[in-house]
Image: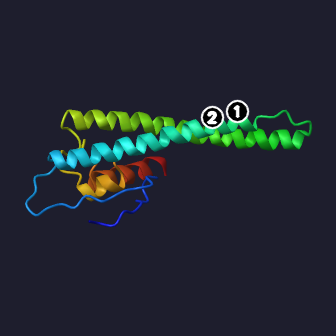
């Protein structure tokens, strides 16, 4: 059995890479189940982090008499809330990706329709573009924004 590892693209605590078999059909039931579990685990971890933040903010909320202490706490809470907002948006993206899995549209490039690839999807499970289309998209963005 392959060694459990953490991929750098996201923060799953336990992750076992999918081992493709020679001649295996792309996005077969086994692969779709692998990605469903991956996405659900990722979503669960993000939701747990939201719960931890809410508990932390309730527990740590204090009305410090010193303005510097109060400002530090407000800045800490603001940073946490911005992080949770990004994660909330990511949870929505995970939900839409799970819908793609249900409709058998997952794993194919939105721009050109080719297979995105198992390894790329493991690195970025919510990817909707193949490497080539994503690269072109980034080049166009650099040209537009300077």
Mark 2, residue position: 54
Label tally: 2
- Front position in the image: 119 or 34: 34
Q: Are marks 2 and 1 in contact (CB under 8 Å)?
A: yes
Residue 36 screen position, x and y as percent: 29, 42
Residue 134 screen position, x and y as percent: 32, 51
- Front position in the image: 101 or 29: 29
Q: Is residue 133 above or below residue 19?
A: above
Q: Where on the picture, by quarter, is residue 22?
A: bottom left
What crowding class fits label 1: few (fewer than 14 Cα within 10 Å), some (14-19), or many (20 or more)? few
Q: Secondary structure at mark 2?
A: helix
Mark 1, residue position: 58
Q: Secondary structure at mark 1?
A: helix
- Front position in the image: 125 or 55: 55
Residue 143 screen position, x and y as percent: 42, 51
Marks 2 and 1 sit apart, C-alpha to C-alpha, by: 6 Å
Residue 130 screen position, x and y as percent: 26, 52
Tell me which residue sits at (64%, 36%) in the image. 55
């Amino acid at each position: 059995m392959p060694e459990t590892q953490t991929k750098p693209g996201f923060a799953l605590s336990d992750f076992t890479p999918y081992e493709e078999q020679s001649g295996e059909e792309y996005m077969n039931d086994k692969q779709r189940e692998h990605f469903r579990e991956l996405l659900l685990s990722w979503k669960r971890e993000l939701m747990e982090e939201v719960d931890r933040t809410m508990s932390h903010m309730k527990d740590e909320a204090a009305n410090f008499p010193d303005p510097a202490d109060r400002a530090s706490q407000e800045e800490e809470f603001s940073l946490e809330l911005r992080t949770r907002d990004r994660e909330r948006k990511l949870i929505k993206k995970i939900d839409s990706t799970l819908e793609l899995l249900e409709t058998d549209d997952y794993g194919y490039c939105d721009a050109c329709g080719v297979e995105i690839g198992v390894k790329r999807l493991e690195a970025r499970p919510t990817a909707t573009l193949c490497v080539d289309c994503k690269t072109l998209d980034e080049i166009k963005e650099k040209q537009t924004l300077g």
